[in-house]
């Protein structure tokens, strides 16, 4: 295991400041100057900060690529919304597990340690799928409650052309509430 860099040993607030300065477009020299101004006791070599910034930028690029790929695949599959990327990640996990278990179209037998890891991965994927389903159900319930509140608010204004028959029809149409 590699030892911690000088920057990894800094207090979290200082590391956060470095990240914030980099995100705002500051150069290595500007970040060093700001650190020396705010934290005179902190000494960081320019080359150390340069390596850290390169790693930080590379990680940001990888995250952006990953997010773009997940969103593009979700769009291609016709899935959109808050949970689409989560559902896509679950599907990707299933595909990776299948690739691990099947080589050249044949079932590959795994040692007990690998079986345990695969079973934990399946359990995690199942848990993620359930969490996603629970989230979607909660959102659907919240949306239905909001529609019901809107309909009930509209029913208070029956003199403005809304009557109980129309309100009942809207409840059935929007909410699936039986009259």
Image (spheres, grey):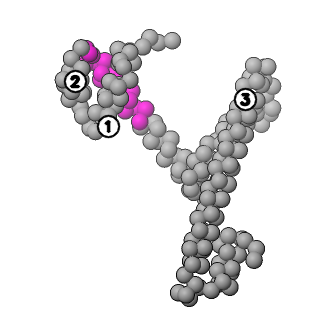
> In the rendered structure, which segment of residues is drawn in magenta?
42-60
Give left or right: position of 159 versus 144.
left
**Residue 178 placement (x, y as % from top left):** 76, 74
Q: Quote the CA–CA distance across marks 2 and 3.
A: 46 Å
Q: Secondary structure at mark 2?
A: helix
> Closer to the observer: label 2 or label 3?
2
Give left or right: position of 93 versus 56.
right
User: To which residue does mark 1 refer?
Assistant: 23
In the figure, residue 35 lies in which quadrant? top left
Residue found at x 46% / y 36%: 62
In the figure, residue 21 lies in which quadrant? top left
Mark 2 and mark 3 lie on one chain; the one further toward the N terminus is 2
Q: Looking at the image, do the residues carrying marks 1 and 3 touch, with CB atoms under 8 Å apart?
A: no
User: To which residue does mark 3 refer?
Assistant: 120
Give neighbour class at mark 2: few <14, some 14-19, many 20+ (Cα, 10 Å).
few
Residue found at x 39% / y 27%: 55
**Residue 80 circle label:** none
Q: Secondary structure at mark 3?
A: helix
**Residue 38 circle label:** 2
């Amino acid at each position: 295991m590699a030892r911690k860099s000088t920057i990894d040993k800094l207090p979290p607030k200082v590391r956060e400041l470095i990240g914030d300065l980099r995100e705002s477009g500051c150069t290595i020299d500007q970040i060093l100057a700001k650190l020396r101004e705010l934290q005179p006791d902190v000494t960081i070599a320019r080359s150390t900060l340069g390596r850290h910034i390169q790693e930080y930028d590379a990680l940001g690029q990888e995250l952006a690529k990953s997010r773009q790929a997940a969103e593009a695949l979700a769009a291609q599959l016709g899935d959109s919304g808050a949970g689409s990327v989560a559902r896509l990640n679950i599907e990707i996990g299933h595909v990776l597990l299948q690739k691990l278990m099947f080589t050249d179209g044949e079932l590959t037998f795994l040692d007990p340690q690998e079986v345990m890891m695969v079973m934990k991965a399946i359990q995690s994927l199942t848990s993620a799928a359930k969490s996603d389903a629970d989230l979607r159900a909660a959102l659907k319930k919240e949306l239905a409650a909001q529609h019901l509140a809107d309909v009930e608010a509209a029913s208070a204004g029956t003199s403005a052309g809304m009557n109980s028959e129309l309100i009942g029809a809207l409840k059935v149409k929007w909410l699936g509430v039986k009259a």
